[in-house]
Amino acid sequence: MVTAPPPAAGDTIVAVATAAGRGGVGILRLSGAMAFAVAHALTGAPLPALRQAALRTFHDADGAALDQGLLLCFRAPASFTGEDVVELQGHGSAAALDALLRAACVHGARVARPGEFSERAFVNGKLDLAQAEAIIDLVDAGSARAAKAAFQSLEGRFSTRITALAEALVAARVFIEGALDFSDQDVDWLADADLHARLAALDEDLQHLSADAQRGRALQQGLTVVLSGAPNVGKSTLLNQLAGVDAAIVTDVPGTTRDLLREHLTLDGLPVTLIDTAGLRDTEDAIEAEGIRRAWAAIEQADLVWFLVDDRQGMSADDAALLTRLGPDRPCWRLANKVDLSGGVVGWRPGGDPPTLGLAAKAGQGVADLVAALHRHAGLNASDEPLFTARTRHVDALRRAAAHLRLARTQLADQAFAELAAEELRLAHDALGEITGRFTQEDLLGRIFAGFCIGK
């Protein structure tokens, strides 16, 4: 395959826009000032009218007929990237597409970097950064629900709310700075009740948006759940039950699981990474001890820990010690397994600390309750319409914006710090701007678009 040279400003890029391998259709996409000229060289025929498909023969670098398909042209700025764009839609032959790609490079184009089409759309104002990220979220969606949420972000649902908050912050800041400029007047503008009410409403709106973003992040990135507990309490059995396959070896021999076993699942539309771990206990077996060390490392990184116990035996002193080691800051549920053998009740038990669910993993009893609780933990309900997808950086930016806004309200209460309040509002506004790309460092942009597919 042709490799991409270092990027150059204003040049014409080309890439295969369809998945690698055989397929019914293969698409080559061009964008840039020479896109039409390259397309003409590849077809040797007049270009069709804008936005109208025409049948054309595609030629390789030597001018030999290579394939036949549809040619579409889009004139700047009315295109995805905001530049002249051409698509050649032929048969899904990897060899033919590669030859066509080479021919395009001979005629003046260069191979696009991953995400460069979307990056150009962002630079040319066709998309903001949150919308651009939604493209790859839609491509990577693991469920219909996640795909719908990603499309909502692509349509601008998330960005619209960000923009409205940012504009309100600017208006409040302008009001405060204007009041400071006219502080010699008899009117005390900074004591205006409407200003304080507006900031309080902004704070509430920001909290709601932050909560929605956390739900969107769970839908896009999923949750990481670690199954932990003593040996032979049913961790691997529960993983197999949720996975629907025998992903983990299950025996009556303690210490069967010695390494981490990861299963990426979609549970009623929620992406979940389940990590089965070695049973936590003291051991002189070097291999098992390494598995236990890795188990604790996984627990440290988990969004949620499921701590399994055998309901026939109840909580042992060792179990209590392990729970204590988990610490109060690590979200944890205790799963009392094997209630079908203990005579216990399936379902959540009142007053549990940590929350306790009785279940029978092998029989599948209580598993539906567990999955439903997982959705609630992520802030999602099965009946909720998807809002939008979000990422960790979005959630972090919203948290920083909220912190700056709260500090501004505190400082405004003491009018001696009104100038500092205006500065905090500016910082809150800038934090929101990071989400849409208005205030974003170049290296962050590079990392974001590098994660895209070539041709996107």
Image (cartoon, grey):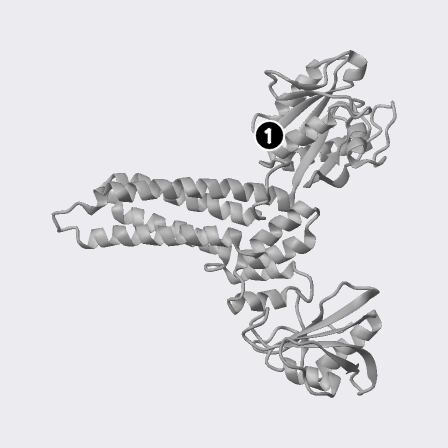
The residue shown at (69%, 26%) is: 369
Query: Where residue 187 sits: x, y (%)?
Result: 15, 47
Say above or below: 55 vs 137.
Answer: below
Question: What is the three-letter code of the residue carrying label 1?
Answer: Arg
Q: Which residue is mark 1?
A: 330
The residue shown at (61%, 73%) is: 7
The residue shown at (25%, 53%) is: 177
Q: Nearer the viewer, residue 40 or 397?
A: 40
Query: Where residue 303 sits: x, y (%)?
Result: 63, 36
Secondary structure state at the residue bearing disc 1: loop
Specify whether residue 4 is in view.
no
Instruction: Choose top left, top right, bottom left or bottom right for residue 251.
Output: top right
Q: Quadrant of the N terminus?
A: bottom right
Please indicate whether residue 225 sits to the left or right of residue 68 in the image. left
Query: Where residue 153 sits: x, y (%)?
Result: 56, 53
Please indicate whether residue 181 sits to the left or right of residue 233 in the image. left
Query: Where residue 284 sits: x, y (%)?
Result: 80, 25
Instruction: Choose top left, top right, bottom left or bottom right for residue 443.
Output: bottom right
Say above or below: 205 vs 153.
Answer: above
Please indicate whether residue 417 sits to the left or right of residue 441 in the image. left
Instruction: Choose top left, top right, bottom left or bottom right for residue 96.
Output: bottom right
Q: Nearer the viewer, residue 49 or 387?
A: 49
Say above or below: 12 vs 303.
Answer: below
Say above or below: 281 vs 258.
Answer: above
Callout 1: few (<14), some (14-19), or many (20+) C-alpha neighbours within 10 Å?
some
The residue shown at (13%, 51%) is: 184
Specify whether residue 243 is in view.
yes
Q: Quadrant of the C terminus?
A: bottom right
